[in-house]
Image: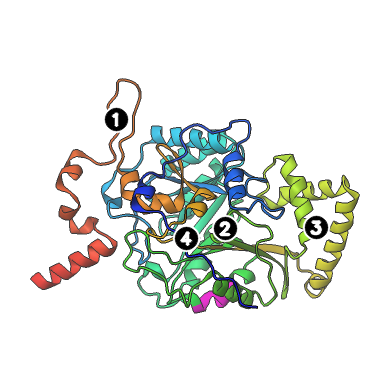
């Protein structure tokens, strides 16, 4: 039988992107914070039993951009042309946005402290931001390229309540002296060591493009071999958005399916995706392994057990992100349900058998997760995916889908912000910057395509 012809995708027009507004500074339903996401997933027919977004949590995470400055010039940078021209967001506004995040999504919300690179701000600033997030009972993660994330900084932030540190390391950064992803393992190991014994979860982001897609199996093996120190590795597929010199991905080379297969190749075991499902499956794919020495098995390959377990945990309304907290709660949930207990016992026996060689050698089971982000091109935004987005950005006017924000980033980051009554609005751009325009920006302030074009002009003049 012939396969049905897929309907052509319809993308948001420029006017629709312009009119795609943040969700406001107040929650739509304060007594049901998961309602907006759950409703969007239901409209897309994606609120299935295996879906945990809108059920276990009201949002996956919210990016709090504290600076647009960066000390690298990535070839696939998502920042916009005006990024280096705007001032850092002042503390009063950051605190207002942190409260807004809490009002929208409540306890245990994952707040990504990001930019730009947030480590370009002072340690006292970062400590104050982390402490503020913690005061609301939310979780914080520092997203950084690691260059300025010293042990001293990480220790101070951990003491203030930082939960995670997420290191971005890959070939798009064009770090001098590193010609391959394998060469960059030296930096990855250095960063892992830098965060050791600070009670921080360590995660890694890797942007996938044509020059490193073949490295995915080796990278997976690297992260798997360090599962005792690394909690999650995220692979972010190339997208045509932002100021980077690279544009659209090779759609014959880089697809969700190809990346999933390459991860499975590196894991050296069959993997299950979309159990659990986290938001829109065209945007996100998630899987996890249990590792004991050289023994490896898929974590989520028992749909009946995990579907029922997630439903039970969702009723508890607790922090589900920390392993040492989740396991006791999962065991408690099993004790209250004979069916869940039976399923859990059978699952545990199956996993113990799969890991038996490593367990008998004294290795403790470790979990490591792998995530795939399929970001959309700025001019190819799909309405349903944007409305069902689980990765938001905290703008001055409320949370906004990350892909939509990236598509109109200049307009978002240059918007003036009201201060206290009677005070002049805070303007991210100084009057001088607004007057000179982007075309007259100093060469040292240019990055991405703007800098590449300026470099060509300078070469011609020389």
Instruction: Point out which mark residue 202 bears.
Output: 2
Badge 4 or badge 2: first in the primary sequence: 2
Badge 2 or badge 1: first in the primary sequence: 2
Q: CA distance from mark 4 to mark 2?
A: 22 Å
For residue 232, what is the image quadrant? Answer: bottom right
Q: Residue at x 55, y 72 (%)?
A: 259
SS at mark 1 in the image: loop
SS at mark 3 in the image: helix
**For the residues bearing labels 2 and 1, Cβ distance under 8 angstroms:** no
How is colour applied across the structure in the image? rainbow
Left or right position of 408 against 107: left
Residue behind mark 4: 375
Task: Tell which tag, 3 or 2, sits nearer the viewer.
Answer: 3
Q: CA distance from mark 1 to mark 4?
A: 33 Å
Q: Is 216 colored magenta in this rendering? A: yes
Instruction: Point out which mark residue 305 bears.
Output: 3
Residue behind mark 1: 425
Residue 415: percent from left, percent from top? 31, 39
| 50 up-or-down from 129: above or below | below
Residue 34: percent from left, percent from top? 61, 40
Left or right position of 360 against 265: right
Quarter of the figure with the N terminus? bottom right
Query: Which range of residues does the magenta coloring cover?
Result: 214-220
User: Residue 462: in sight, yes or no?
Assistant: no
Q: Nearer the viewer, residue 83 or 364?
A: 83
Q: CA distance from mark 3 to mark 2?
A: 28 Å
Q: Residue at x 87, y 62 (%)?
A: 346
* Disc 3 packing (10 Å; few <14; some 14–19; many ≥20): some
């Amino acid at each position: 039988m012939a396969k049905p012809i897929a309907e052509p995708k319809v993308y948001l027009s420029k006017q629709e992107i312009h009119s795609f507004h943040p969700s406001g500074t107040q929650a739509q339903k304060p007594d049901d914070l998961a309602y907006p996401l759950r409703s969007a997933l239901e409209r897309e027919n994606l609120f299935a039993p295996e879906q945990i977004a809108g059920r276990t949590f009201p949002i996956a995470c919210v990016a709090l951009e504290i600076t647009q400055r960066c000390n690298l010039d990535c070839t696939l940078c998502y920042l916009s042309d005006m990024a280096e021209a705007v001032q850092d967001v002042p503390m009063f506004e950051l605190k207002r946005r942190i409260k807004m995040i809490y009002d929208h999504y409540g306890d245990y919300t994952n707040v990504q402290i990001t930019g730009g690179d947030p480590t370009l701000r002072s340690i006292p600033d970062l400590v104050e931001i982390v402490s503020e997030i913690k005061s609301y009972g939310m979780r914080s993660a520092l997203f950084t390229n690691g260059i300025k994330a010293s042990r001293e900084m990480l220790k101070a932030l951990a003491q203030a309540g930082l939960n995670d540190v997420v290191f971005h390391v890959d070939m798009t950064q064009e770090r001098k002296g590193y010609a391959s992803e394998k060469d960059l393992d030296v930096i990855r190991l250095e960063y892992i060591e830098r965060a050791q014994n600070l009670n921080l979860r360590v995660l890694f982001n890797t942007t996938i493009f044509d020059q490193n897609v073949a490295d995915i199996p080796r990278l997976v093996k690297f992260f798997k071999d360090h599962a005792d120190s690394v909690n999650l590795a995220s692979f972010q597929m190339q997208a045509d958005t932002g100021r980077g010199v690279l544009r659209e991905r090779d759609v014959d080379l880089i697809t969700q399916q190809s990346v999933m297969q390459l991860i499975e190749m590196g894991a050296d075991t069959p993997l299950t995706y979309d159990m659990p499902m986290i938001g829109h499956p065209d945007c996100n794919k998630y899987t996890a392994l249990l590792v004991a020495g050289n023994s490896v098995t898929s974590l989520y390959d028992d749909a009946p057990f995990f579907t029922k377990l997630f439903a039970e945990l969702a009723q508890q309304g607790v922090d589900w992100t920390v392993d040492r907290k989740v396991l006791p709660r999962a065991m408690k949930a099993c004790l209250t349900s004979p069916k869940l207990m039976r399923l859990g016992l059978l699952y545990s026996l199956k996993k113990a058998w799969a890991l038996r060689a490593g367990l008998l050698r004294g290795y403790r089971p470790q979990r490591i997760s792998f995530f795939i982000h399929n970001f959309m091109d700025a001019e190819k935004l799909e309405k349903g995916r944007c409305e069902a987005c689980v990765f938001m950005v905290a703008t001055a006017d409320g949370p906004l889908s990350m892909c939509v924000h990236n598509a109109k980033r200049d307009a978002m980051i240059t918007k003036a912000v009201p201060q206290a009554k009677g005070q002049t609005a805070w303007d991210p751009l100084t009057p001088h910057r607004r007057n000179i325009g982007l075309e007259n920006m100093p060469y040292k302030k240019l990055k991405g395509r703007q800098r590449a074009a300026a470099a060509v002009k300078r070469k011609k003049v020389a």
